[in-house]
Amino acid sequence: MSAEIGIIGGSGLYDMAELTDREERVVATPFGDPSGPYVLGTLRGKRVAFLARHGQGHRLMPSDLNFRANVFGFKRLGVTHILSASAVGSLKDDYRPLDLVFPDQFLDRTFGRIGTFFGRGLVAHVGFAHPVCDRLRLLAAGCADAAGARVHRGGTYVCMEGPQFSTLAESRLYRSWDMDVIGMTNLQEAKLAREAEICYATMALVTDYDCWHPDHDAVSVEMVIANLMANAVTAQRVIADTVERLGVDRPCSCGDALKTALITHPDAVPDAVRRELAPIVGRYLPVAE
């Protein structure tokens, strides 16, 4: 059983209530284990695969996530679109707790994370100037409007390492750079989705004002979770409506991201790497029979 659409649930979003015909699927990858089993099922008439980013019971820290395995697993399942839900802090007065933000840019403040499938004898450089799929992003934002949420289209998501929240100096610095929201997970997902030729968009759920705000100088897990739970019903409706309205056509360029990205001469690519990455590069580097 395959799936067309992948859903990544972040903090506070560990399930999709409307999902029917459920089946848990353990997917093996060359990069190790994903965060947990994928839950395959039907949502508004479409086949979807849901993955709780932080695992059952929220066991995995942002720095411990196996981003490569998570995205590769979706690719193995036949997924062509991923909508990722993520808790974020706001870096602007106008982005209030419980607002939904659909960013179109990322800024990397992580370190030591692996954000590529390539290496080991195969080099690729994908275009990443526009790191999310605008078609998917704007469709989801429209569904959020229809659900009655306060919606912000565009903006930059600062991806920090964590697991600690920002220092006051860091929070003020990001504001001086005109950044919009801050989180700990979505950048690597976006990079890997692009390499896997999967359309990707982030639905960022604002939970707090980070520590720069005079009324929010001590961000707590309790504050974050309380706001996430308050937004969970809206988030699930937005995801379900987006899935229902998403067409099978892909007029964007996400599906051909590797067409001009592979730089290693085909004769120089190790056979083992060809085999391991076949779900991603097979259309460009066929595996010899």
Image (cartoon, helix red, strand yellow):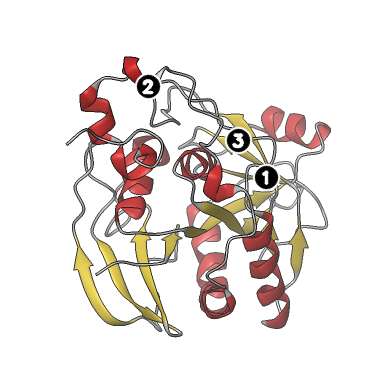
Identity of the amino acid at label 2?
Pro
Q: Position of residue 142 (x, y in %)?
A: 71, 73
Specify whether 55 is left or right of 235: left
Viewer-side label of 1, 2: 2
Q: Nearer the viewer, residue 245 or 61?
A: 245
Quarter holding the C terminus?
top left
- Residue at which label 1 appears: 217
- Residue at which label 2 appears: 266
Q: Position of residue 226 (x, y in %)?
A: 52, 67
Q: Nearer the viewer, residue 115 or 78?
A: 78
Mark positioned earlier in the residue sequence (2 or 3):
3
> How far apart, in angstroms, are the residues tagged by discs 3 and 1?
10 Å
Viewer-side label of 3, 1: 3
Q: Is residue 82 above or below residue 109?
A: below
> How far apart, in angstroms, are the residues tagged by discs 2 and 3?
45 Å
Identity of the amino acid at label 3?
Ser
Mark positioned earlier in the residue sequence (1 or 2):
1
Element type where label 3 sits in the image: loop
Q: Nearer the viewer, residue 59 or 103?
A: 103
Q: Are marks 1 and 2 in contact (CB under 8 Å)?
A: no
> Which residue shows up at 53% across the image and 73% down it?
239
- Residue at which label 3 appears: 166
